[in-house]
């Protein structure tokens, strides 16, 4: 039973060059259970990425604590896989070697690494590209490799920070289906940050809406759409109703950001 | 011609060659035409004759060999010591804070000014020549490697951490491979400078090497030999540069892909 517990976590960036300290994240509390797919939705600058980085252990909270299965998070580790918005494949490693990076760090033999990496290559539909360099791949293929790389490590929870943010609309839709397919099949605990409303509903079992800076949880909306979901669900009345509701929630926040600027 | 418009590789080669032709033509015009006195500048033909004389009768190949060995020896010594220090400085900020001010200062100490001191310390043997090149190269390499390693993409480092890499894993599997092509480029650049230092080292208190031949020729006012010596240095530099580039391309195929 995996449980990620975010307990009163806040983050304030210290004052710099005469500017006042920036409160990025108000004390936030959230539990993510086993095999949950939670999407965090918010306007840019709402601290959603900060929260994810704190869970990953790449940033420290100013107050509060994050625990995974009862153990406090004090730094990054292989139990929390992360996929970034920017392309972070290692350019000097091939697709297969990138996916096997974590396995190699753990001391898996070459045969094991090959076997596991190739299984994930098939899973994300990159067969035939095992020996390509990241430079030779499109943006969508790079992010698929990055997802495979995180999954190959078999983390307890997968953290995704707007992984499809830089992709075009069509590619993005295909990537969402691929990710959802993997989740429906393998049942992983996933925390997915996005500013795309449709993406948040389509993927998530729950959508956490965050307010503009300083970020805090504004609403939590359960998405009771059945699985497996296909892209066609995006035009059903239930989906559209959810979307309408979230559009309102997000719009007020976006307006606040616009006024602050 | 339009700004930034590419040329074909054939055009490139033709233009590159054209400059050499123009250069030799101007040189011939100045010397054969009698516009410059023979005492100051030999004509191309004399230069070739003198070059043949040097190679065939005066054992110039031995001098070339000596110079190459000194450059490679001093440079390799500097690289072996400087690269690890540079990597440590780039990776660990306290190490950088400790060494950076001194290295920045030492980098500006002119290697050629150390020659009298080095003669005093190490005599006029091979060690002194190697040390001149070592001093000229080591601080430059340290500093440039440190900057390169320190500029490793943070998101790659973070990605490696989330994949379970520890600190030594970060250095071995992220910082080093990420900086390696740049480090190879730095070494190629500094090797070029090492050639300057070796000639200066050979000009003073030396009994062999290209620089020594050049001083000897100066005493005899043999400008043909001097120019031949300079051209040989240029050619060796060009060849080593080409080899280094080809080696780097072979070593880092992911850069070209």
Image (cartoon, coloured by chain):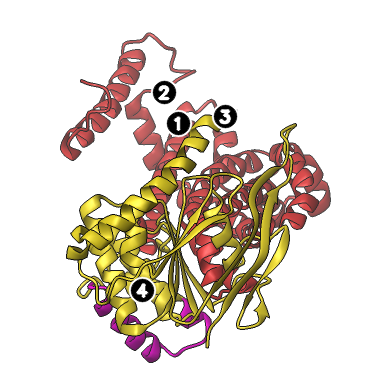
Mark 4 nearby-residue class (10 Å; few <14, some 14–19, many ≥20): many
Label 4 sits on residue: A148
Q: Nearer the viewer, mark 3 or mark 1?
A: 1
> Which chain does tag 2 point to?
B
- Element under disc 3: helix
Q: Is residue B53 left or right of residue B132?
A: left
Label 2 sits on residue: B42
Residue A90 or residue A122, whichever sits in front: A122
Secondary structure mostly seen in the magenta stretch: helix
Q: Nearer the viewer, mark 3 or mark 4?
A: 4
- Asked if marks 2 and 1 fall on the same chain, the answer is yes
Q: CA distance from mark 2 to mark 1?
A: 8 Å
Occupied quadrant, residue A7: bottom right
Q: Nearer the viewer, mark 1 or mark 4?
A: 4
Residue under the point 73% across and 50% down? B124
Q: Nearer the viewer, mark 4 or mark 2?
A: 4
As drawn, the chain in yellow is A
Label 3 sits on residue: B218
As drawn, the chain in red is B
Q: Which mark is residue B227?
A: 1
């Amino acid at each position: 039973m995996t449980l990620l517990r975010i307990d009163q976590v806040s983050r304030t960036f210290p004052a710099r060059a005469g500017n006042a300290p920036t409160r990025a994240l108000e004390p936030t509390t959230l539990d993510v259970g086993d095999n949950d797919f939670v999407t965090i939705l918010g306007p840019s600058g709402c601290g959603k990425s900060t929260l994810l980085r704190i869970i990953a252990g790449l940033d420290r909270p100013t107050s509060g604590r994050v625990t995974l299965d009862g153990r406090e998070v004090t730094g990054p580790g292989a139990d929390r896989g992360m996929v970034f918005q920017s392309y972070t494949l290692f350019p000097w490693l091939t697709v297969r070697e990138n996916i096997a990076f974590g396995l190699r760090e753990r001391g898996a033999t070459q045969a094991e690494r090959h076997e596991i990496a190739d299984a994930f290559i098939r899973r994300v539909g990159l067969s035939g590209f095992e020996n390509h360099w990241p430079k030779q791949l499109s943006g969508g293929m790079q992010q698929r490799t990055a997802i495979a790389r995180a999954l190959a490590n078999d983390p307890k929870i997968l953290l995704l920070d707007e992984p499809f943010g830089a992709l075009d609309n069509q590619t993005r839709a295909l990537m969402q289906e691929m990710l959802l397919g993997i989740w429906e099949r393998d049942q992983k605990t996933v925390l997915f940050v996005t500013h795309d409303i449709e993406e948040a509903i389509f993927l998530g079992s729950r959508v956490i809406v965050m307010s503009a800076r300083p970020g805090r949880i504004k609403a939590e909306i359960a998405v009771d759409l059945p699985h497996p979901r296909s892209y066609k669900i995006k035009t059903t009345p239930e989906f559209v109703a959810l979307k309408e509701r979230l559009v309102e929630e997000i719009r007020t926040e976006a307006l606040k950001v616009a006024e602050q600027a | 011609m339009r700004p930034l418009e590419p040329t074909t590789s054939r055009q490139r080669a033709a233009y590159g060659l054209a400059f050499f032709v123009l250069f030799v033509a101007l040189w011939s015009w100045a010397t054969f035409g009698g516009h410059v006195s023979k005492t100051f500048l030999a004509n191309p033909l004399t230069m070739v004759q003198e070059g043949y004389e040097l190679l065939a009768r005066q054992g110039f190949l031995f001098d070339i060999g000596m110079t190459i060995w000194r450059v490679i020896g001093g440079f390799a010594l500097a690289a072996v010591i400087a690269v690890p220090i540079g990597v440590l400085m780039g990776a660990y900020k306290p190490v950088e804070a400790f060494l950076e001010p001194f290295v920045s200062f030492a980098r500006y100490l002119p290697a050629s000014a150390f020659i009298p001191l080095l003669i005093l310390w190490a005599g006029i043997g091979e060690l002194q020549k190697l040390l001149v090149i070592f001093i000229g190269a080591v601080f430059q390499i340290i500093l440039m490697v440190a900057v390169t390693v320190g500029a490793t993409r943070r998101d790659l480092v973070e990605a490696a951490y989330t994949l379970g890499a520890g600190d030594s894993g970060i250095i071995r599997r992220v910082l080093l491979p990420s900086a390696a092509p740049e480090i190879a480029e730095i070494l190629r650049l500094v090797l070029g400078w090492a050639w300057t230092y070796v000639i200066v080292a050979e000009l003073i208190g030396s009994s062999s090497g290209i620089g020594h031949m050049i001083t000897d020729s100066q005493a005899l006012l043999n400008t043909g030999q001097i120019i031949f010596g300079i051209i040989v240095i240029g050619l060796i530099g060009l060849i080593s540069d080409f080899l280094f580039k080809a080696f780097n391309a072979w070593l880092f195929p992911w850069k070209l892909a």
